[in-house]
Image (cartoon, coloured by chain):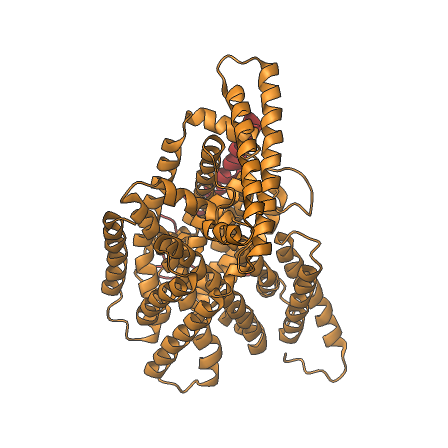
Amino acid sequence: MAPSPPPGPGDGARPPLGTWGQLYALVISSLVAEIALLYVLSRAFR
Amino acid sequence: MSGLDWAVLAVAIGAIVGYGAWRSRGVRTTESYLRAGADLRWWTIGLSLVATQASAITFLSVPGQAYVDGVGFVQFYFGLPLAMVILSAVIVPVYHRLGVYTAYEYLERRFDRKTRQLAALLFLVSRGLASGLAIYAPALVLSAVLGWSASVTNLALGGVTVVYTVLGGSRAVSRTQSVQMAVVLAGMLAALAVAIASLPVSLGQGIALAGALGKLKGVDLSLRFDTRYTLWSGLLGGLFVQLAYFGTDQSQVQRYLAGGPLAQSRLGLLMNGLVKVPMQFFILFIGVMVFVYYQLAPPPLFFDRTALEQARDRDRPGVERLERAHSRVFAEKRAAIERLLAPGAGPAEVEAARARVREEEARDVALRREAGSLVARTVPSADAKDSDFIFLRFVLDHFPRGLLGLLVAAILSAAMSANSAALSSLGATTVVDFYKPRHPEATDAQTLRVARLATAAWGIVAVGFGGFASLLDNLIQAVNVLGSLFYGPMLGVFLLGFFVKRVRGSAAFAATAAAEAAVLTAAALGRVGYLWYNVIGCAAVLVLAPALEQVLRRMPGRARSA
């Protein structure tokens, strides 16, 4: 894997809220929730 | 269109072009022409990414697709949030560190010039052709609204987009995209509101009816390779296609390589990952509501009215026979739907009514298919499928004054935003990956002039190819199939660069060329769903390149500098 670059000056290496890991977890858990909702919808109305 | 519609359309388009011109004044250097600008914030980058992917085709074709096949197409986007996380964590930091203008520059740093130019060429071919389709789709709307021929509107709309992109470059593109997205969002909200308000039943009953007819199957767990959209093809194939699209397609890479802080690019990508699946579902849901509407009010036999009338002129008895059968099926289905939705019906009655509704729907589908064949047989220039016209027909027949103008403005905005991004990136790639390496001595003013000329030339190619788009059955699928023919090998060579350290230029180049040939062969044989082309192409590069590297290293007298 390519090494992560060191944060440069003024690079805003940290997100404005939380950590990058938390933001990634937010994006992935939203996807999981959306898939689950769509699945429930398709089972409930058929 | 009424005077009010024209006024709404003129104000919306005028505001967008004016804002773009005002914000992109002072583009005098190649840097400011090819990069969006260092001061872009993450929400502008995120909107720009969404706007670049959401072309007019999205808003015309996707509701029609939901009408025919339900919301299952949403699965195509399941891989996108995962792709955004991978890009944000691994790939974008590398692009930023290298300070590249195009994604392909990375390939020369990692491999060699021929590999860089092969990937850039694959991009130019696929994006150049796809741009043609993306200009044609809204030209079709204009043609239906104004009654002009689609060739004229294709030329007019393409012309406007080309001029503003050539003048303002990438900066004009990114700046106008946020305004364009606001217009698009307003138009789509209006479309959903009109669709729901037109229903003669409650929203809940409408959803129940859509479900009974299989239009709400958003997740398909089956493990079939020949089914286009399943959870698995969406997650895996979708991950590959979106990684390739956002990571290696310059029309997207240019949006987040604005030259500003890395964190803004990463946040912009994650924002795209959060909004995309709900947005696609929303657009598909509009199509489902249009479907429900036409279960309760008589739909036309064929939604491309012009083609149907031409067919009627040539085979009146044939068309009228189908129309009579279609009316009978509609009446039978309507009666069964009333039994299905009747309050107080017992489970057995509901089940019987549901079976009857499905039976009549199957008859209706067969009749529509027959009508399509008749149209295609009698009108050689027309297409057997009318799915791209479904949403348009609904809009033209049901939108109140003023809102029609807003919806046309939304579709044109989407067209302009996606096409200007594509043309700008085609110009950038031509200059950065082909012109500059051959003319390192060129001054900035010369390079800027070539960039403008290249952008204009690609505009002409795209508008020219748009003239052929009417021959394709569903525009959005055509765009995705076209992309999938090239994205696999493209993604493969980038992944090779990032993760397989020991492979060098010549092996990477040969493996990419061979993988492209493999994908084109798979497509010609037509046995696998197109999303799998991405997986095949990418896997072929990743398997072939290390093997070729081994062979090359063992060849006696072989130069090791490749």
Of residue B474 and residue B237, the one placed in the foreground of this image is B474
Q: Nearer the viewer, residue B423 or B137?
A: B137
Q: Residue furthest bottom?
A: B441
Where is residue B334? Give x, y as percent: 51, 27
Is residue B454 left or right of B502 when viewed as pictured?
left
Give the color of chain A as drawn. Answer: red
Toward the viewer: B204 or B322? B322
* Location of residue B212 by image quarter: top right
Image position, residue B297 (x, y; %): 45, 32
Q: Is residue B262 visible?
A: no
| Residue B111 position (above or below residue B346) | below
Residue B228, x across and y down, in percent: 62, 47
Tell me which corner region of the image, top left, top right, bottom left or bottom right, holds residue B446: bottom left
Q: Is residue B194 above or below residue B345?
A: below
Q: Looking at the colours in the rendered structure, which chain would you say is drawn in orange?
A: B
Image quarter for residue B450?
Answer: bottom left
Residue B33 visible in the current orientation: yes
Q: Nearer the viewer, residue A2 or B188?
A: B188
Residue B335 coordinates in the image, percent (x, y): 53, 24
- Quadrant (top left/top right/bottom left/bottom right) for the C terminus of chain B: bottom right
Q: Would you place residue B123 above or below residue B236 in this image?
A: below
* Residue ranking furthest to the front: B317
Residue at 72 percent of width and 71 percent of height: B548
Task: Tally the marks.
Answer: 0
- Name the residue located 47 percent from the left edge and 45 percent from the top edge: B390
Picture residue at 34% right of the left edge, 62% below the top = B173
